Amino acid sequence: MSIKRLFYLIFSVNIILLLLLAGLSIALFRVQSSLAKSQETRLKSIKLADELRQSSDDLTRFARTYVVTGNDFYEKIFNEILAIRNGEKERPENYDRIYWDFVIGPEDIQTTTGTKQSLQSRMIEAGFTNEEFQKLKKAQFNSDELVNLENIAMNAIKGIYQDSKGNFTKRATPNREYAISLMHGLDYHKSKKEIMQPIDEFFQLLEKRTNDNVRKLEKTSIYLISSMIGVIILLIISLSFSFIVIKDKVSNPIDQLTKVAHEIGNQNWSVQIQYESKDEIGRLASAFRILKEKISSLIQDINESNLNLSKSNQDLSQALVELKAAEEQLIHSEKMSTLGQLVAGVAHEINTPLGTIRTAISNVEDAMTYILNFPFEQISLSAHTLLKSIMERDAEPRSNYLSGKERRQKKKEFAELFLSHNIANAEHAADLILDIEMSFPFETWLALLQEKHGASSLELLHKISRLYSNAHNIDNSVERASKIVFALKSYSHRDNSGEKTNISLAESIETVLVIYKSMIKSGIEIIKDFQWAGNISGYADELSQVWTNLIHNAVQAMDGNGEILIRIERDPNPNFVTVSIQDSGKGIPPEVQDKIFDPFFTTKGRGEGTGLGLGIVKKIIEKHQGEIMFHSEVGIGTNFRVRLPL
């Protein structure tokens, strides 16, 4: 027999035994529930019979007390007991316990009540046999008959007696002795016996019925428990047999095959597989034996292949090193290519301050020649005062420059005023005063020109003022050229250490903007919103390449007109910072948006780009464990967002 069929058989037998055990357990539970219910019914029946007996005793006690004392309270209690028994009044809570024995006065009566239900109706619900019910019914009937006797005695106390029809309508003298004789006479005690006799017989019938039922259920319980024990013994035997079969047919063969597998794992190919059988494990051992032979053959082939792979791996490692070097060179070449496009603009940026310096030096030479040859003994006191003010003013940076239109208007006003006061060369004098750019009132200049050597003093003041102005121009031009040279040096620097450094994102972007100043046309506005001014750890020259490519693309996308918003802000994730470069250019068409990071893909014309820029940008960002995203709409613009870890 196969292991599969044997296991099915064992499993089926065990399942049947478990189901049988479960069925017996359920049957036993039901028997025990019936036994408990029988005991509960017995207790309830006893309580009902006892309540009948107790109510009869309570009626007797309160009727006798009323007859002796004549207290209306006891008559009221008597009638209330009858009303509760007959279901005419609510039955108090816990009425089946001691109740009326605790009632001495009106204040002892409980206020909590239950439902209206007669004692006889509750007896019917209790499920008594007909014989049992007839006994209790007879006892209640006899109790009701005794109530009539008690009513005669209690009415005699009040002087009310029965007429020929049995109704209490006749009035006469109250007769306490007669009432007491009725309540304590032999007839009264016989009536009480007639009440208690059926109740006692009911108890006998109830005892016999419940005892018979309990004995029957106990026999059934013993039978079920014995059956369960038998099924448990069979289940233990079945499980023991299952264990033996599994150990002999499965566990031991698998242990043998496991040992063989370990030996094979230790390269011991001479180990033999001894187990043989016609079942599934035997077929597995046979297949394992064939597999061992094939693996042994394959190992020899693998060893030979490993030698070839080892040599190939060395070649691949060398190729990977060369590929990485080529990749770094490609990135640097792209950077230098971009820098080459800026050379003409950068040269113009440097030539502009150099031209300013050349012009300023020429003006300085002319002013120095004039000043050195000037007869200073002709300078008046007012000229000295103005000269001192000019020198103090030129020690500070200049401000409040006039536009061309404002200067022409001011010159016209001064010239007309000077002519009205007969000042020679009024327009020339107005030009000199506006060059000096001093905010003295017109009267000060008029007073100077009206002096004997006023015109020559004004020329001197003009030369000295221009001397200071040109000195400032030279200083500003040198600073401007230095910034451009520094930015070029920072941009073209190549860090070969391969280690990250602390980088200020704001300074890195500012460097790129300085270099690109010549490429950014007058119609393009750069808006900087640097909300975060911290440092990150990264590769400075590679991040400069990122900003260069993104800003360069933004400039080209706007065709010389628009605005570029550069924002640095903390990312919602506190471990990242975000740099966004947004332009108002023509946007990227939707059909090519998924290709813009592909190497050599470009939307520019032939000869305008290599298509490597954004591909290199993405690679650099991924090298920093960051990510780059973009959103673009045709005709509205493009926004590139770079997330970098702190």
Image: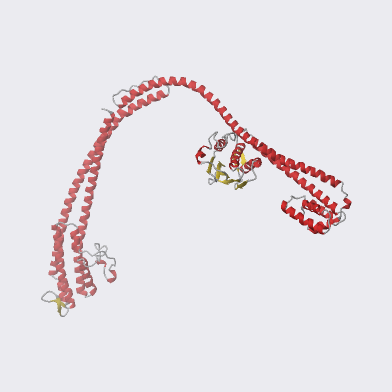
**Residue depicted at 39% across the width and 21% down the height:** 294
In x, y percent, where is residue 259? 38, 25
Along the viewing direction, whichever of 490 and 558 lies nearer the viewer:
558
Q: Quadrant of residue 258?
A: top left
In x, y percent, where is residue 62? 21, 70
How is the protein colored in the picture? secondary structure
Along the viewing direction, whichever of 399 and 130 lies nearer the viewer:
399
**Residue depicted at 55% across the width and 33% down the height:** 600
Along the viewing direction, whichever of 495 and 168 lies nearer the viewer:
495
In x, y percent, where is residue 601? 54, 35
Residue 353 relative to residue 158: left or right = right
Count of marks placed on residues? 0
**Residue depicted at 29% across the width and 67% down the height:** 111
Q: Is residue 184 visible?
A: no
Q: Looking at the image, is 287 positioned above or below residue 518?
A: above
Residue 565 relative to residue 215: left or right = right
In x, y percent, where is residue 192? 15, 66
**Residue depicted at 21% across the width and 41% down the height:** 227
Residue 532 relative to residue 201: left or right = right
Q: Is residue 532 visible?
A: yes
Q: Quadrant of the N terminus?
A: top left
Q: Looking at the image, is 264 positioned above or below residue 206?
A: above
Residue 138 relative to residue 324: left or right = left
Instruction: Name, please, the residue furthest toward the left.
Output: 164
Q: Quadrant of the C terminus?
A: top right
Along the viewing direction, whichever of 187 and 399 lies nearer the viewer:
399
Q: Looking at the image, is 150 positioned above or below residue 128?
A: below
Q: Quadrant of residue 240?
A: top left
